[in-house]
Amino acid sequence: MNLVIDIGNTRVKVYLFKNNEIIKREVLNETALIHYLKLIAIDDIRNIICSSVTKSYKDQLSNIFKNSNYFDFSDNNLKIPFTNNYETKKSLGQDRIGLISSAVLKFQDQNSLVIDMGTCITYDFIDSQNIYHGGAISPGIRMRYSSFSDYTSNLPLLKFQDITKIIAANTEEALHIGINNGIVGEINQYIYSLKKSYSEFNIIITGGDSIFLLNKIKNAIFADQDFLAFGLNYIIKLNEGE
């Protein structure tokens, strides 16, 4: 079996894969991760990969799973299923590498734009020749809401509300409308601009806040919440036995 760990800014997902299928999935807080991994430490786990946007767990994982192969993103010999044209390759997030790998796996030989709606909104573009060109990063939904109260004296901290109005009748509505339409407008403009260079490409939307974009982005493909995990498992398959 393969152990796949996805550590984001707000939550951790732990998966067990067998024959390219998820047989176990757990969502937990990062503080509970090591305790949970010790509970599931079994000899059947042959390979491990961990994508983290917080810190490295290499030493702890290697200690818990002494008989397993650990595939490390910092290893220059680690194979990935695409050509990385990012200028600062070492700064490309592990989660973004996993997302791009999943796009290669599920949409082979196709142009694809992957939009991940998480703490940040990330845009990643890979062409039909499996060449990764880069993308963009902007604040996610919660980050936009918190910025109002963090950087102003009088604006409140609100929770997300999906609102269809375009003209606000009060300050709270104005904040909701600004964030809602700001995100949708940003994404549509990014897609519009990219189409000047690539006439056809998949628009793949994933991430914990992706439901917000349902029916708001034309021709979008909504990937399930395990999209990143399949990309990480694919990287294991590429390197297994090397």
Image (tube, helix red, strand yellow):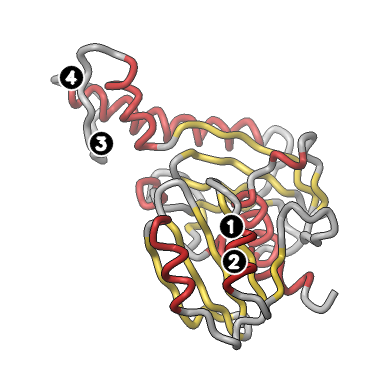
Q: Judge by depth and name the residue closer to the eye, 67 or 210.
A: 67
Disc 4: which residue: 171
Disc nearer the start of the sequence (1/4): 1
* Residue 212: % across, % down: 35, 46
Q: Are marks 1 and 2 in contact (CB under 8 Å)?
A: yes
Disc 1: which residue: 57
Task: Classify 223 as above or below 84.
Answer: below
Disc 2: which residue: 61
Q: Nearer the viewer, mark 1 or mark 4?
A: 1
**SS at mark 2 in the image:** helix
Disc nearer the start of the sequence (4/2): 2
* Residue 239: % across, % down: 79, 70
Residues at marks 1 and 4, CA–CA distance in whole angstroms? 44 Å
Question: What is the quadrant of residue 3 in the picture?
Answer: bottom right
Task: Name the residue located 72 percent from the left edge and 57 percent from the top edge.
Answer: 110
Disc nearer the start of the sequence (1/3): 1
Q: Is residue 119 left or right of residue 92?
A: left
Amino acid carrying label 4: it is Thr
